[in-house]
Image: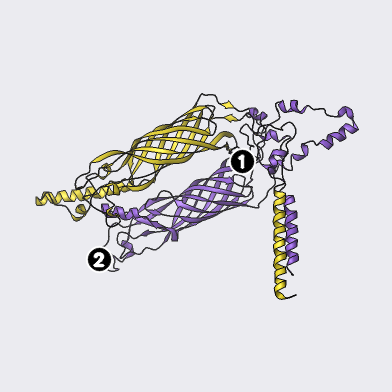
Amino acid sequence: MKSSPIGLLVAVALGIFPAQSWAQAKAGKATVAGKAAATKDSEGVIDADASGSAASGDAAAAEAAPAAGDTPAEAAGEETGDTPTGSGLDDICKIDPAACPNLDMDKEAARPLKEQIFAVQQAYALRVRRFELQAGWSQSLNDQFVGHPAPVLALNYYITNVLAIGVNGQYYSPFNVDKDFNAQVRRAARVAVPLTEYQWGAALNFTYVPAYGKFAGFGDFIFHYDAYVVGGVGAMSVRPIAVIDPDNRNFQYEPKLAFNAGIGLRIFFNRWFAAVLEVRDYVFNDKLESLTSSKIPGNGPNGAGNPSTWYGETSLTNNVQAQLGAAIFIPFSFDYRLPK
Amino acid sequence: MTITKQKTTKRLVSVLAAALALFAFTERAEAQQILLTGPLAGAPAVRKLRQHRKARFEVAPAVSFSLLDEYQRTILVGARLNYHFTDWLAFGAWGAFGAAHIPTHLSEQIQEVNAQRRAEDAAVQAATGNPAFMQRATQLTAVNIGPDFTKQLGSMDWVVAPQLTAVPFRGKLALFQSIYLDTDLYFFGGPAFVGLTERKNCETCNGNFAMESRVAIAPTFGLGFTFYINKWSALGFEYRALPFAWNTGGIDTAGGGKDKKFPDNKITNDDRQFNFNQVLTVSWNIYLPFQYKTSE
């Protein structure tokens, strides 16, 4: 019986909670009604930027009206106060009947709206002075011999709204996959292809965000996205898979200097959570297994067991990885510098 | 009060509390209804929408590049033709021919080793006067590797793919905070007819590296982005999958053993391996008529 009051308190708390937090569903429809129409362009979506320049080129959009499911947070709090209410008009009419507005609503509805439009309004999610934590899974795109899937973690700090510095890392070691295709080629052509497996990768990166935009989906909801380029320098720990002389060769992982460059797309679900799709090329100088094996047994200078005889040519290797993951921006909230 | 009764009462109160909580949860969630009043009452969600696609033909010259090829890359040159019934639905076709076939590094390596072996064999044949001499490696690969390995590779010669396209997402893109483009994201799918050239089936395959053509029928699907440059043209980027089985290397990989997963020294249909063929396409889209319509 001791816990029953707690249960009742939870019930009461849950009863109170939604009344306050859920009252804004689809608020964009209602609260934008006054002047938020001005924030729409002719695709029915709100421009996204904080620069606030005037939009002469989007003049055609002046007649746009708000779309369903548009950004409620932008509209709420800023624009609800502009919509006159019936009681407010009544008060004016009582005080000064001459100033009482006499509007024909049908005529007003038919009148084209010629309000000022901003080409770019507030960016949906500001990045400046926020940390971005990314977690995801990546898959190699260009190695038909060995698959290199890996979990990925990244941490970025946005110095400006478009520029970030950060680190990322991948852990490949348990996930390398030597494909059946290799055995088929070796069997059919009696040609061995040197193979390499990866252990981990880590890099220091710079990220630049030159593009952002938004999509209206099925004419009902809007999602914001941005596209970025990323580049950096770091290391990859790699080793050959012994295929020429597996009886004598046992390679150890060695870190190699690795440069990387890539592009990414971030789709925002809200102002602090996004999905990330990224393609990045990690370039490093790989030491391949020697295609010839020594006939001399033992670990002598030219012996098959001597590691110096195991390596062959070096090759500039591209490890192109496609990454799918999620990003969390911290702190979760932020303030706009300007109201518009 | 006995312990059993106490427990029962405790459970009852807990269940009641949970039920109350659930009722509290749903009651307010369903109560929200927006009544739009004023000049915008009854107005459409979007006015003066630029309908880039509705009732327009799309002619899009395109270049496609194959991805993750084992033995040979293909560059396909062609075009996509679509008629957009609405702003979000189109029917059309993509057609292309294999303008260039480029062997991969693996194929070049195989051919390099192959040429070296054949040169060594020729030298021994000349020295010994035995024209039938073949070293062990040449004997073992006689069924699989011809005089020029790159000539026996399977190639994609042409593709015709009728397809249905849906455009559920449209929006815009700001580039460097100064260039603004209308964009859309579309998905498509349909059957594809693929003209292939691959190694001809043979029972006795030593020295027999003849090629033949056939048409493979496969599903095709993918997605693409369109970036509108002006009222009548756009840039397109598209990813397409074309999964089907074919013998890309012209080699014997299957057909023998209990489960037919071992070589049988013949080239048969079993040697066609499933490939998730993929291409990336870049296109320049032209829309006819040149002027788009706008919504009310």
Residue placed at 26% from the left, 45% from the top?
Answer: B149
Q: Position of residue A110 (x, y in %)?
A: 71, 26
**Shown colour of chain B:** yellow
Q: Position of residue A182 (x, y in %)?
A: 33, 54
Q: Earlier in the sequence, mark 1 or mark 2?
A: 1
Instruction: Looking at this view, name the residue that lies furthest to the right.
Output: A95
B67 on left or right of B182: left
Q: A13 and A193: which one is in front?
A: A13
Give left or right: position of B7 versus B142: right
- Residue A313: image location, x then y, percent: 33, 54
Q: Residue at x 60, y 52 (%)?
A: A328
Q: Is A95 situated above or below B26?
A: above
Of residues A219 and B4, the one nearer the viewer is: B4
Chain for disc number 1:
A
Residue B163 in the image: state x and y as whole percent. 44, 35
Judge depth for marks 1 and 2 and give the one in front: 1
Task: For mark 2, name the chain.
Answer: A
Identify which residue, A131 or A234, lies in the foreground: A131
**Dot 2 lies on which element?**
loop
Which chain is rendered purple in the image? A
Q: Are the residues at dot 1 and dot 2 in contact (C-beta closer than 8 Å)?
A: no
- Cα gap from disc 1 to disc 2, whole angstroms: 69 Å
Q: Quadrant of residue B136?
A: bottom left
Q: Which residue is mark 1?
A: A222
Quick one: quadrant of the C terminus of chain B? top right
**Badge 2 is on which residue?**
A296
Q: Is residue B145 left or right of residue A11?
A: left
